[in-house]
Amino acid sequence: MTARRRPKNHEQLELIPFEFRTPIGVRMPVTAGTRGRGALRAAGLFAGIGGIEVGLERSGHETALLCEIDDGARAVLEKRFPGVDCPPDVTKLRALPSDISLLTAGFPCQDLSQAGQTRGIAGARSGLIAEVLRLLSRRPVPWVLIENVPFMLQLGGGHALDFIIRALEDLGYSWAYRVVDSLSFGLPQRRERVFLVATNEGDPRDVLLCDDAGPPSPAKPTKRRAFGFYWTEGTRGLGAAVDAIPTLKGGSSIGIPSPPAIVLPSGRIVTPNIRDAERLQGFEADWTLPAREATRREGHRWKLVGNAVTVDVAEWIGFRLRAPGSYDSSRDVPLIRKRAWPRAAWGTGGDRRMSSVSSWPVRFERVPIHKFLRFEAKPLSEKATAGFRRRILASTLSRPEWFEEVLEAHYAFISAAGARIPR
């Protein structure tokens, strides 16, 4: 199924009350307030498999241009966004089309990620944000949406974000950013990302900071709850999540897919199917199937899904772009940055302030991960279990008191037989 397209006269559509939908069928109204603006025509740079664009289209905006260099991702975009021009190389774009009103950029995070090379904004891939700023300097657009990993707030003393914000301010943009967790949208994936909205015609705070539901009390890990963790870790961390999985990643440093593991309430340990990984990012199952057909590599789908932007987060931002809220900044304090940036902040007219909003702008009902899974999961292999078991037993990492017992039981089970794994 292709992404929903907007009619050509989308500028004339009247803004109607919007009802936010989550992939698990929960329907919860979001108050639109009294203000509204028309749909925007978006250009998506570093589009990946279209997470931002799908979310924006679900909230009424139109995708007018895409740019993506990865062959597998381009195959997905060609299938899911038929008729939308998609040049491969952002460095060869001379200028944005004159009718673009929203520029989006989930620019490469490899040089900013804690799991990557951490070279910073000067890295060959993450440094491509300079191309976004070049295009904005040639032809400014009213709205800009940028996404990346939270580690950029602290890497090199926050130099990457400082570079981006100073450039946007020099171009006359007001800005606001916050860390947003995909868990808050009803998806059982703990995934924090930084979203930055900049504008030269509105108030970015009324888009990005106006909603704040706050996180629920943390759930306690027990044997009766599913427990997600990264089996590729074991010396530096677990990346654990209760009734959820930790952040889906693009893969290992040598290009091998590394989906997280899940301890099911039955005691068995599995890794999710790629189709459920797509659903955990808000896509339809088999969204990335065109990538396999184009590259002949099933593992490449994991990279694309792990690097994607969660659709539901983009849909919420898209809705707020059409129906801004009203942010109360009266308790915000001046931004005094020694090293790392705060988790939420804004700047307008030379005034920079910290915001206390949480990473949970909304809070939707969430199905536990073991009930969310729709497709058959694979048992964590004997080799993978043995390697993780060796690392975790040699470490002093904090883990649930029952974790080692479950790990040993799974190792014995998987060593003895390849039985079908019950949920």
Image (cartoon, rainbow, N blue to C red):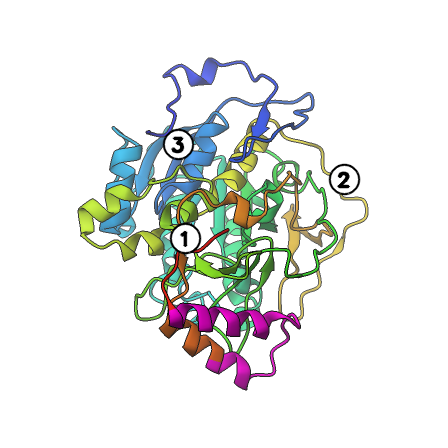
Is the Cβ of the residue at disc 3 closer than 8 Å to that at disc 2? no
Residue drawn at (70%, 56%) of the image: 219
Per the rendering, the mark at residue 99 is none
Residue drawn at (64%, 49%) of the image: 347
Q: Position of residue 142 (x, y in %)?
A: 49, 35
Earlier in the chain: of badge 2 and badge 1, it is 2
Q: Amino acid at mark 2?
A: Asp
SS at badge 2: loop
Location of mark 3 (residue): 100
Q: Position of residue 227 (x, y in %)?
A: 57, 59
Would you say residue 27 sits in the magenta stretch? no
Q: Amino acid at mark 3?
A: Ile
Would you say residue 414 sits in the magenta stretch? yes
Location of mark 1 (residue): 377
Q: Nearer the viewer, mark 3 or mark 2?
A: 2
Using residue 329 as the reference point, say whether residue 241 is left or right of it.
left
Per the rendering, the mark at residue 328 is 2
Q: Position of residue 24 (x, y in %)?
A: 54, 35
- Cα separation between marks 2 and 1: 45 Å
Q: Amino acid at mark 1?
A: Ala
Is the Cβ of the residue at disc 2 closer than 8 Å to that at disc 1? no
Q: Nearer the viewer, mark 3 or mark 1?
A: 1
Q: Is residue 93 something one can see in this rendering?
A: no
Q: Which residues are magenta?
A: 390-416
Res 108 quadrant in image: bottom left
Q: Nearer the viewer, mark 2 or mark 1?
A: 1
Using the image as rendered, state which of residue 120 and residue 336 is in the foreground: 120
Is the Cβ of the residue at disc 3 closer than 8 Å to that at disc 1? no
